[in-house]
Image (cartoon, rainbow, N blue to C red):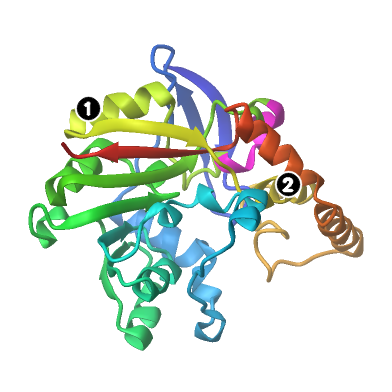
Amino acid sequence: MKVQYHLYDDRYGYVGEFDLNSCRSCGHIGLSHEFSRAELSDLYSNYYPRSSFSLDDYHKHVEVGRLRAWYEGAYRSAFRWVPRNVRVLDIGCGFGETLGYHESRGCDAYGVELDENIKRVVEKFGYKVHVGDFDCSLYEQNFFDYVTLDQVIEHLSDPIAALSGVARILKPGGMVIISTPNAAGWGAKFFGRRWINWHAPYHVNFFSRKSIRVAAARAGLDFVGGVTITSSDWLHFQWSHLFAIPPMGTPSIFWTPSADKDFTKRAALRLLEKFHQTGINHITTRFFDAVGVGDNFVFKLSKL
């Protein structure tokens, strides 16, 4: 292992510096820091932005047309790969938008979420959500047709243990869909330590095509395939992020709406929004995905 970068939270202002290490043999990259359960609860409940979300702004995800889905990179999301009328578990279900989407398509949907802000959504909509860490013992063996980890596995300190638990509760022939940033893609190479998807200290593991195969095999799962499909918005976020990088301990004016903004930075962010509307970010993103070096992986695993 070698230290690739020294990083800090350049989005939400969590204090601390973190070493990003890379494995020479399998290409796996990760932070060396290990958080306690109390630290994780503080990190996600008090620094992640969902505490400011209003239930009035809650909207379940909806179907999108094929052309729009391609143009926007919508299939970078794991939930888009789940068919109708199946039993599905979304590990890391966020604010519950995917659960509403699945239920609208006839699915028996379950969720797991560490961020306690999900309780407000559960109380209003009655979703089946376990608030806390993923615990496979809460579910019957061979229970789910699909399990999704949508921008989640990079947050897990022990992803092989999590995948082993998924293998236990997945039906034979069932599928695991994982979306996760691609640290070997063009964005990480071009933007270096300012790549938005390092996202320290929230992202702790970055899988390569080789290391996800190793993890799947250790967990008792079969690797089916992987492609790069990236949200077109991510490149817009990247440019905006570069204009708004704060010092350690200070929230970014781009990622934190309540943070103070000066006139110059407000104007720059408005111009970047106008630039995004030209579609150049979309076409650029589609090109890098087409040649296999996009910023986001979608991996498929199965249980034999």
Q: Quadrant of the C terminus?
A: top left
Q: Position of residue 94 (x, y in %)?
A: 42, 64
The verdict on residue 55 being magenta is no
- Residue at x 52% of width, y 77% of height: 59
Magenta extent: 190-197
Q: What residue appears at the point 45 percent right and 70 percent down from the top-left corner?
A: 97
Question: Mark 1 = which residue?
Answer: 217
Q: Secondary structure at mark 1?
A: helix
In the image, 63: left or right of 219?
right
Q: Nearer the viewer, residue 278 or 104?
A: 104
Disc 1 marks a residue whose amino acid type is Ala
Q: Residue furthest top?
A: 25
Which label sits in the foreground, 2 or 1? 2
What x and y, as percent, mark residue 138? 12, 62
Q: Earlier in the sequence, mark 2 or mark 1?
A: 1
Residue 74 image position (x, y, % from top left): 57, 54
Residue name at image x 69 percent, y 34 percent: 287
Relative to 276, is 56 on the left or the right? left
Q: Decide which of 294, 20 is in the foreground and name it.
A: 294
**Badge 2 element:** helix
Residue that sits furthest to the front in the current view: 66
- Magenta-colored stretch includes residue 195: yes
Which residue in the structure is indicated by mark 2? 282
Q: Is residue 219 visible?
A: yes
Q: Which amino acid, mark 2?
A: His
Residue 41 sits in quarter: bottom left
Q: What secondary structure predominates along the stretch shown in magenta?
A: helix
Q: Residues within 10 Å of mark 2 (few under 14, many from 20)?
A: many
Which quadrant is the N terminus positioned in? Answer: top left
Q: Residue 14 or 148: which is nearer the viewer? A: 148
Residue 173: x %, y % from top left: 19, 43
Location of residue 43 by image quarter: bottom left
